[in-house]
Image (cartoon, rainbow, N blue to C red):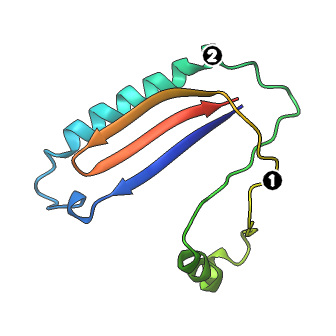
């Protein structure tokens, strides 16, 4: 089982003016709803075994990966480029929540 977080996009206009923070109210409400849904979603998942581990897959464009390799801050981080995902299998997908605001799009689901 795995949680999948997809399409984390922030428009440049999102940052806006530091004095006008009113646009953050909707974002805060959306994140609160998202966190509540995420914390209660364990009812559809099996218990995690004691010897569990995790992996993080990051899908990027090739040019971004090149920039990461050139950045000294990421020298110690073990980035492993992978041409194709291994073990492509059919999975069941349980949608949890999608957040849509004018400047932000975020969705999450569980694959089992």
Q: Position of residue 31 (x, y in %)?
A: 36, 35
**Residue assigned mark 2:** 44
Q: Name the front one of labels 2 and 1.
A: 1
Label 1 sits on residue: 86
What secondary structure is found at the residue carrying circle 1? loop
**Mark 2–mark 1 distance (CA, rounded to whole Å):** 26 Å
Assign a secondary structure to mark 2.
helix
Q: Which mark is residue 111?
A: none
Establish if 31 lies above or below 6: above
Q: Earlier in the sequence, mark 2 or mark 1?
A: 2
Q: Is residue 21 left or right of residue 57?
A: left
In the image, 22: left or right of 60? left
Frontmost residue, 65 versus 88: 88
Viewer-proximal residue among 11 and 16? 11
**Would residue 39 appear left or right of 12 to someone viewing this image?**
right
Q: Quadrant of residue 19?
A: bottom left
């Amino acid at each position: 089982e795995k949680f999948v977080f997809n399409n984390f996009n922030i428009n440049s206009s999102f940052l806006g003016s530091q004095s006008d923070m009113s646009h953050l109210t909707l974002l805060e409400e959306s994140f609160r709803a998202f966190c509540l849904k995420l914390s209660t979603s364990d009812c559809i998942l099996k218990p995690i075994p004691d010897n569990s581990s995790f992996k993080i897959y990051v899908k990027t464009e090739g040019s971004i990966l090149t920039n990461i390799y050139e950045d000294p801050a990421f020298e110690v981080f073990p980035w492993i480029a992978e041409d194709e995902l291994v073990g492509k299998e059919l999975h069941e997908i349980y949608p949890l929540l999608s957040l849509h605001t004018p400047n932000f799009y975020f969705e999450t689901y569980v694959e089992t």
